[in-house]
Image (cartoon, rainbow, N blue to C red):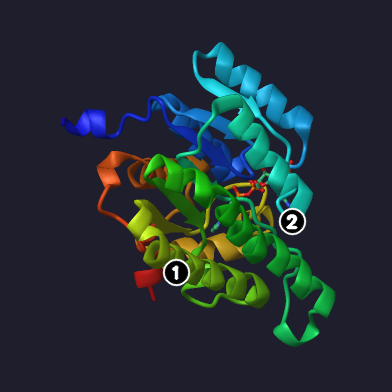
Amino acid sequence: MSINSKFDLTGKVAIVTGSSKGIGLSIARGLAEKGAKVVISSRKQEAVDTLAKEFSEAGMKAIGIACHIGDSEQRKQLIAKTMDTYGRIDILVNNAAINPFYGPLESAGEEVFDKIMNVNVKAPWLLSNLVQPHMKENGGGSIINISSVEGIHPGFRLGLYSMTKSALIMLSKNQAKEWGRYGIRSNVVCPGLIKTKFSESLWSDEKLVAQYTGVVPLRRVAEPDEMAGIVMLLASDAGSYMTGGVYTADGGYLISG
Ligand code: NAP
C-alpha cells in the first residue's frame, strides 16, 4: 500500500467537536480534504451549517450538527444524527474545550471547577463511550484527544485548565489500553500557543508573546492550520500502529528554558 493511499480517508466518517473555528476547523478541513465525511460541530447550528455548505461547495463531504459537549442529551443526539446520516463513525476528535478561569488556584470557585471538568474531561470521556460501540462494530477507529502543553507542564495561572488537559492525556492512554483489542486507537495532541480566539488574551499581549518567542525554539506563535497534519497521521492508516501516544506540536516549547 502506498503511503499516499494510507493517508486517504475516503469512506471514513469523522466527528470533530468545536470545529466551527480555530484548531477544530483546520482539523475538520484537513480530514474532509483527505476524503472523510466530516461532522462539523459546535454550540451554534447556524455556524456549523454555514461551514458544511462551504465544504460541500468546495467538493468535500460535510454536515453540521450543533452540540454543546457538556450537555448529555446533545451528546447523544450528535452521535445518533451522525449514524442516521452516514451510518458509521471511524474518527472522533475531542477538540472542544473551555477555559473560564485565569488566576491562582486558591481563588477559583467550586462551580468553575465543576464547569471546566464537565466540558474538558467528562464530555470527551462520555462522547468516546458513545462512539466506542460503533467503532467496535467496524473493527476499529481512531480517537484523537486535543490536550495542550499545559497538560504536561504547568504554566502560570492556568491551573484548573492544566489539570483538565492532564486528565485528558490519562483518559487517552486508558482508552488505548482498554480498547486496543477492538482495533480502536487513541492518541493525544498537545498544541503550544496557537493563534485562535481561545488564546487571544495570550497572543495579543505583546510582553507575553515576546517572552514566549524568546524561549521557544521556533521563535514564533503557530497558526491553527499547523495542527492539522499530526491529526491526519493519527486519524489515518498511516498511523495504524500508533496508540496511547502523546504528541506535541509546540514549536519546541516543552524543551525550551
Ligand atoms: P477556539 O478557536 O476558541 O475554538 C473553539 C471551538 O469550540 C469553537 O468552534 C467553539 O464554537 C467550540 N466550543 C466552545 N465551547 C464548546 C462547547 N461547550 N461545546 C461544543 N463546542 C464548543 O479554540 P482553539 O484554540 O481552536 O481550541 C481548540 C482546542 O485546542 C481546545 O481543546 C484547546 O484547549 C486546545 N488548545 C488550544 C491552544 C491555543 O493556543 N489556541 C493551545 C493548546 C491547546 P462555539 O463557541 O460556537 O460553540
The quadrant where residue 70 appears: bottom right
Q: Is residue 139 above or below residue 246?
A: above
For image coordinates 77% across by 48% down, the residue present is 73
Q: Position of residue 60 (x, y in %)?
A: 50, 19
Residue toward you, 3 or 103: 3
Task: Kindly report which numbered mark, 1 or 2, lies closer to the viewer in this rendering.
Answer: 1
| Residue in view at x 77 percent, y 32 percent | 45
Residue kind at label 2, given as amino acid type: Gly
Check disc 1 and give the amino acid type. Asn
Q: In this orientation, which residue lies closer to the viewer: 247 or 118?
A: 118
- Could you tell whether 121 is left or right of 152 in the image? right
**Where, by quadrant of the figure, is residue 99 drawn?**
bottom right
Circle 2 sits on which residue?
70
Q: Which residue is mark 1?
A: 174
View extreme (front): residue: 137
Q: Position of residue 48 (x, y in %)?
A: 69, 30
Answer few, some or many: residues within 10 Å of disc 2's Cα (few below 14, many 20 plus, some between 14 and 19). Answer: many
Identify the image quadrant of residue 231.
Answer: top left
Is disc 2's CB within 8 Å of ligand 1?
Answer: yes
